[in-house]
Image: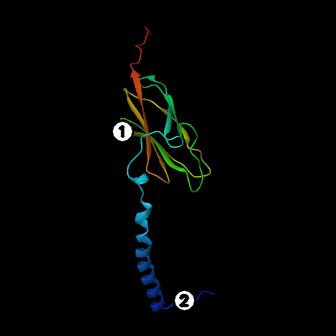
């Protein structure tokens, strides 16, 4: 059986919800630690993205770029500690992004891409407990060999 509440009860609930938000927010500032101040680019065994790609590729030809989160050990994938997404860019132009689910997905992806010119591959990964981590790798793109067909 559903019992309807009166207007005064609903008003009281709304006032409580609004005022309790201020109390809740007071502790929020304590959660904003230096871990969230800026993207990280240093070395961390579980957070630094590991980029596996050829040093040289031919313009316009497909090749694989594999990204694993963690250089010395793979980042965990738990509900309370996981990688939310992985992004691949070339010279700050986003090429691909994958969103990950905790528990069901491991923080490792492979993208098949093609480039027109040399540049810097940049990977960002966003764990749920700090700001994003980044890693870069230069890649050289060579011109396609001229066709020998006559």
Q: Which colour scheme is used?
A: rainbow
Residue indicated by mark 1: 92
Q: In which quarter of the image is residue 135?
A: top left
What residue is at 37 percent from the left and 26 percent from the top? 118
Q: What element carries label 2?
A: loop
Mark 2 or 1: the one toward you: 1
What residue is at 59 percent from the left and 49 percent from the top? 77
Left or right, 31 with reference to 80:
left
**Nearer to the camera, 88 or 20:** 20
The outermost residue toward the right is 1
**Nearer to the camera, 29 or 2:** 29
Place of residue 121 in the rendered image (x, y in percent of width and height, measured from the top left): 42, 33
Residue 23 to residue 106: above or below: below
The tag earlier along the polypeptide, 2 or 1, is: 2
Residue 80 to residue 67: above or below: below
What residue is at 49 percent from the left and 39 percent from the top? 49
Place of residue 86 in the rendered image (x, y in percent of width and height, measured from the top left): 48, 44
Residue indicated by mark 2: 4
At label 1, counting other C-alpha atoms closer than 10 Å, the crowd grade (few under 14, some 14-19, many 20 or more) is few
Residue 119 to residue 75: above or below: above
**Marks 2 and 1, Cα distance to the nearest angstrom?**
56 Å
Residue 28 to residue 137: above or below: below
What residue is at 38 percent from the left and 31 percent from the top? 120
């Amino acid at each position: 059986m559903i019992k309807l509440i009166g207007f005064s009860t609903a008003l009281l609930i709304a006032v409580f919800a609004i005022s309790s938000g201020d109390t809740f927010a007071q502790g929020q500032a304590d959660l904003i630690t230096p871990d969230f101040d800026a993207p990280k680019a240093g070395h961390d065994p579980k957070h630094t993205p590991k980029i596996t790609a050829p040093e040289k590729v031919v313009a316009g030809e497909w090749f694989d770029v594999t990204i694993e989160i963690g250089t010395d050990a793979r980042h965990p994938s738990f509900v309370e500690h996981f990688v939310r997404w992985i992004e691949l860019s070339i010279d700050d132009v986003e090429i691909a992004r994958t969103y990950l689910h905790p528990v069901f997905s491991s923080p490792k992806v492979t993208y098949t891409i093609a480039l027109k010119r040399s540049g810097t591959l940049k990977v960002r990964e966003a764990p749920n407990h700090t700001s994003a981590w980044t890693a870069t790798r230069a890649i050289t793109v060579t011109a396609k060999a001229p066709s020998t067909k006559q």
